[in-house]
Amino acid sequence: MTEPATDTAPESAYLAHLAGGRFMLQRDPLSGCAVFPPRLRAPGHGGVLGDFEPVSGRGTVHAVTIQPRRPPEPARVIVLVDLEEGGRMLSHMPGADPDSVAIDDVVMARIVTEGDVPTVVFEPAT
Amino acid sequence: MSWSDAFPRGRTAVVGASTFGLGLCPGYSALEMAAEAGYRALDDAGLTIAAVDGLFVALPDDHLGGLAMAEYFGITPAIVDNNRTGGSSFLCHSIHAALALDAGLIDVALITYGSNQRSNAGKLVSALRASPYETPHGARMPVGGYALAAARHMHDFGTTREDFANVALSARKWAQKNPEAFARDDTTIKALLAARMVSTPLSVSDCCLVTDGAAAVVMTRMDRARSTRAPIPLLGGAATVTHKEIAAMPDLTTTGAAISGPRAMAAARIGPGDVDMVQLYDAFTINTILFLEDLGFCPKGEGGRFVSSGAIAPGGTLPVNTNGGGLSCNHPGMYGLFTMVEAVRQLRGEAGERQVPGTEIAVSHGNGGVLSSQATLIFGTEATL
């Protein structure tokens, strides 16, 4: 009988870190880049991944789309963000002016909990 | 041996093709629609359901739809393939059917699909696992995924919203020649650009229809196909998957069609210059631009200018989506099978007012997920064997 790779599988571990206020990702030792979403082994080659470690939260907007909502709901600013350490996430920018967000903008992560699930959103980097 | 060397070029053929219930089909379940399309395709082939020993199915509302379909038809097939790669499922089915037919494992394959999403739900019916990473962001999907790719294409290559509108206008002009098409009213670039925004840069007019619809094709080996009314040989096919969620797409402006297309064409021993027309899955206007680039019909980044030149519209150099496509003909949720039916109708010379004379080779291209799964088929007339 093979033992489980870890006590908690990576999806739950990632979300538990977020719930504790920590934005943590695994790094692929071969590429040196962070991996998102978290995985049991490295995507592509299946090698061992490093333990979860903190990431800076800095990233660059790779693409943005604005989704209008029925007023008074503000439009949703949906972004793909390339993290400084590697990995690309889909996220949104609550409160951001839809007209001011552009590809290549530098942004900073913030952990929020809407409902039960903690998640990473972004705001313009200062 | 490579995929392209191993593919059974021209050794199988589509011998029956049908649509059913396009637009609105109240009173029918998805299963019944798929069954009726299947019966009609078999009628077209001059075969009966009793001959079917390979059944290929993807239904919108039943993950075990292949089992339901076998029960409904009252058959015990040797192969039931319930593969679900989204809207490209049926092109993948066709590749798998060709391999099983050529191996002699089965003799008659039926690929069928039906959806009553417009009558039943009034919106796109989907059966996806919610991503714990993406769901909390409240993005409207799948349109958001395609919009992000469209935004990046505009940024990298100077593609414009007018280019997107030209895709929609070309589709509408073809639809106006197709009595089966759902949206046939006149429109203009100005009207298309003024449509309500859904997810920038895509407006309602950049999104496919939400309709009912069913389709089916029947395939056999070429030896047996020759005794049927109008066989259309499958010259090549290939597929791949690059991701599921849009964040994991390796390059937002290059799809897996850049892999499946060249591989399918190599199997068919043709190049893009040999292709007379393209039937592709235009869930959104950006799809047409991306796939024409990735399949090799224009250089990467030039898709917008290519479609705005009029090349893909009636009278153009490369007719695309001659039935009106998902944008103007019909879109029941997983459109891929309709690209195959239209290619077959054109190659048989049975496309009526929209018939493109002299069509010898047609590409059928399917897409699934958010540009995630790509599958390409090459069909030809018997003269191309």
Image (cartoon, helix red, strand yellow):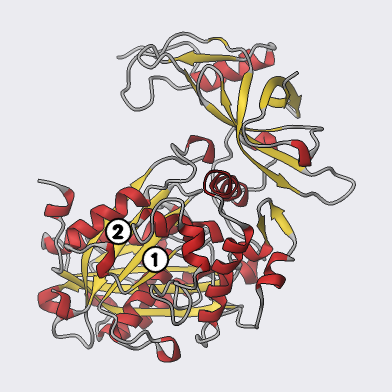
Q: Is residue A78 visible?
A: yes
Q: Residue furthest bottom?
A: B353
Work out whether mark 1 precedes mark 2 in sequence or the reverse, and give the earlier one.
1
- What chain is tagged by disc 2? B
Q: Residue furthest right?
A: A72
Q: Are marks 1 and 2 in contact (CB under 8 Å)?
A: yes
Q: Residue at x 57, y 62 (%)?
A: B163
The image shows residue B41 at horizontal and vertical percentages of 34, 80
> Element type at marker 2?
strand
Q: Residue at x 9, y 76 (%)?
A: B223
The image shows residue B12 at horizontal and vertical percentages of 17, 69
The image shows residue A48 at horizontal and vertical percentages of 36, 13
Which residue is more in the foreground, B83 or B244? B244
- Give residue B80's mark: 2
Q: Residue at x 51, y 73 (%)?
A: B213
- For label 1, the residue is B69
**Residue B190 location, quadrant:** bottom right
- What chain is tagged by disc 1? B
